[in-house]
Amino acid sequence: MGGVEEHIFNLSQCLISHGHKVIVMTHSYGERVGVRYMTNGLKVYYLPVRVFYNQCVLPTMVCSLPLIRYIFIRERITIIHGHSAFSALAHEAMVIGRLMGLKTVFTDHSLFGFADASAIITNKLLEMSLADCNHCICVSHTGKENTVLRARVHCGRVSVIPNAVDTAVFTPDPSKRSTDSITIVVISRLVYRKGVDLMAQVIAEICPRYPQLQFLIGGDGPKRWLLEEVRERGGLQDRVTLLGSLEHSQVRDVLTRGHIFLNTSLTEAYCMAIVEAASCGLQVVSTKVGGIPEVLPSDLIYLTEPNVPSLLLGLETALANLRSGNVVPPWDCHHRVALLYNWMDVASRTETVYHRVAGEKSKTLGSQLRRYMASGVLPFLLIISLAHLMLRFLDWMVPHKVSIRFTTSILLNI
């Protein structure tokens, strides 16, 4: 489970505790298809849509429209909240919902560039999807600037609401730390964007300088082979431990074993990992990219440039302060993070956005099409028009009252 999934789950739990009805809709995961109930009665629809790469689904507007429409009607949805620029299902649901007269909110959790082909295509698709969105949420001010520029969204329709951490779970436990060595913890997906190449070079250079250092690395990905190669070449099998994939419930137990947390990301909109590490009382050394400088106070984090010499300097500074005792005590660090970030505050700020969009007037089809037309992609207009015709046909074929009864039988057979 990644940061986006954790965000959706925790936000849902807080909204339910505030008296709201929350439904989560996602694609199937292996044999997990149909309707499941989670903590506090959170209802999750696992739609029978197959993933094709990296847990992403192909856009199937025409195929998924009837089922998505039935769910919206059956659950009496009033606001659709999509998450992640890469989620085709979220964008489909938002477009379908807007054509049904529902309000939409979108949260962007990532940063994107403007130069390479994949970024240009993604930005154009995001611009089309958000052309008629009621409101957008970004997890940092840097993320807001990025979304406003690449998706051409008016800044007045974008709010900044950071992520949070469950500080009741991520608590320090200094007794778990080794007294004979200093442990540096890394918990990350082992992919290029997370700076695994930098991490490998840092390990290769700092281990010979400090024989008492230990590295504890949690996570998996296509770049794992690079860390294994560095470990083998340097003979560091007893000093670099690769834990592989971790359940989110295991992360706290790994963090409490460390003294320093290392983050080598090349791009981040927020970075939940450093907040969880600080909540567990670790000294954080991180690259100064994206929204990371906004996340923690300066005395709780050592910010470095995304290069090996700067990361080595940051780690050596953290090690020197750790030896001299010139660091914030673990529990003091935890209490400060608890005051800065909590999910109830995030839920309250999100509710403010919901109340704002709920009071907006519904837009006519003509005004929606004009907004989509401004994106300048004719095929997208044709898809929107086809979706509108399908909705009108379904309204005639299966009216709303009939849909509620009919959907029940469909979902029982998924």
Image: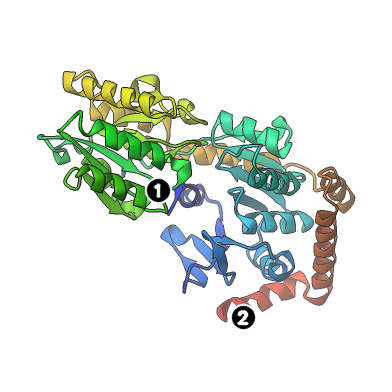
Q: Which residue has dot 1 on it?
A: 190
The alpha-carbon separation of the residues under discs 2 and 1 comes to 43 Å
Residue 41 in the image: above or below residue 137: below
- Judged from the image, the secondary structure of the residue bearing numbered disc 2 is helix
Q: Which residue has dot 2 on it?
A: 409
Residue sticking out furthest to the right: 366
Quarter of the figure with residue 70: bottom right
Q: Nearer the viewer, residue 316 or 301?
A: 316
Q: Residue 279 appears at what percent x and percent y?
A: 32, 35
Q: Residue 383 appears at what percent x and percent y?
A: 81, 60
Side (left or right) of 11 relative to 71: left
Identify the residue at horizontal 50%, vertical 52% (top origin): 16
Mark whose residue sits in front, 2 or 1: 1
Identify the residue at horizontal 57%, vertical 38% (top origin): 111
Q: Residue 353 appears at what percent x and percent y?
A: 63, 39
Identify the residue at horizontal 43%, vertical 39% (top origin): 195
Q: Which mark is residue 163?
A: none
Colouring convention used in this rendered image of the protein: rainbow
Please report contact status of discs 2 and 1: CB closer than 8 Å, yes or no: no
Side (left or right) of 122 relative to 275: right
Answer with mark 2 or mark 1, whichever residue precedes in sequence.
1
Q: Amino acid at mark 2?
A: Ser
Residue 31 appears in the figure = yes
Residue sticking out furthest to the front: 233
- Pointer 2 local density, CA inside 10 Å: few below 14, some 14–19, many at least 20: few
Q: Residue 309 appears at what percent x and percent y?
A: 36, 25
Identify the residue at horizontal 68%, vertical 78% (top origin): 406
- Judged from the image, the secondary structure of the residue bearing numbered disc 1 is loop
Q: Amino acid at mark 1?
A: Leu
